[in-house]
Image: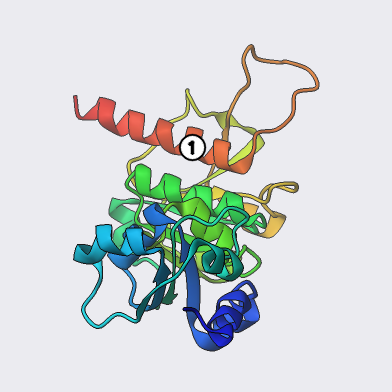
Amino acid sequence: MISKQQIKTIHSLRLKKFRDESNLFLGEGPKVVKELLQSFSCTFLAATPSWIDANRHILPPGINCIAISADDLGRASLMDAPQQVLAIFNKKPSQLPSAHAMQSELCLALDTIQDPGNLGTIIRLARWFGIDHIVCSPETADIYSPKTVQATMGALGKVNVAYTPLPQWLCSLPGDIPIYGTFLNGSNIYEATLTPNGIIVMGNEGRGISPQVADCISHRLYIPPYPLGQPDIESLNVGIATAITCAEFRRRLSAAHQ
């Protein structure tokens, strides 16, 4: 049986104010919860009896775990269609990637990505393409928003995400670290020289990369439509643009190793 206070606590985590005050966030659904249990400390878990019976082997010792009915899960959940289990986790501290990391790896920087679903998708993409670090502007959506957490499908615990003012951070980096950004007036990404390391900046859904951040970018890239020169074509969703960009960087790296 879940208490009214427990439900109230769960519902409060919809708001960033309460997530920040409590240092907690919510994850829901079998896939997300299983993945998050591997990376975050869980303070509370509520699930249907069948889920608990099938997953006792992954539950940490001493976890505050209760069995609840599907009706109670529906009252507690923030989802339109609750999925067997929800859990509250402690947030983890984050830190900016070191200069050494950026000299040997690819990192992502997000300039005011406002849609939580887009942010979650990009975190999931980072995990898929082996990118361990994402640096976000303070105006970017909260990685611990329920919508973001769900969109990551559990990848949140595998990627380090930090927040900092991007212009100051980018312009303070050593000059030998390439900084890429996507623009409508950049070089064709399929023809440009790409390195296996550096930073890929992705911009806001509507405005793209801000002028202040653009001043710090050393390599401007453009994802061309097909065929070239199509009139009145819409710009790409930032999640799709991130996937195309990361895939091309990784394709080049793979080709270089063959």
Point 20% across, 30% down: residue: 257
Q: Nearer the viewer, residue 95 or 168?
A: 95
Q: Nearer the viewer, residue 48 or 244?
A: 48
- Quadrant in which the C terminus is drawn: top left
Q: How many numbered discs?
A: 1
Q: Position of residue 221 (x, y in %)?
A: 56, 35
Point 69% across, 47% down: residue: 205
Kindly give the residue lying farthest to the top in the view shown.
Answer: 227
Q: Which colour assignment does the render follow?
A: rainbow
Point 59% across, 40% down: residue: 182
Residue where numbered disc 1 is placed: 243
Kindly give the residue lying farthest to the right in the view shown.
Answer: 232
**In screen coordinates, is 55 left or right of 43?**
left
Q: Nearer the viewer, residue 213 or 27?
A: 27
Q: Is residue 186 above or below residue 179?
A: above
Q: Position of residue 101 (x, y in %)?
A: 30, 60
- Is residue 134 visible in this depiction of the protein? yes
Q: Position of residue 217 (x, y in %)?
A: 56, 50
Point 46% across, 53% down: residue: 152
User: Tag 1, which secondary structure?
Assistant: helix
Residue 210, picture quadrant: bottom right
Q: Residues within 10 Å of mark 1 (few under 14, many from 20)?
A: some
Residue type at mark 1: give it: Ala
Residue 237, picture quadrant: top right
**In screen coordinates, is 123 left or right of 250?**
right
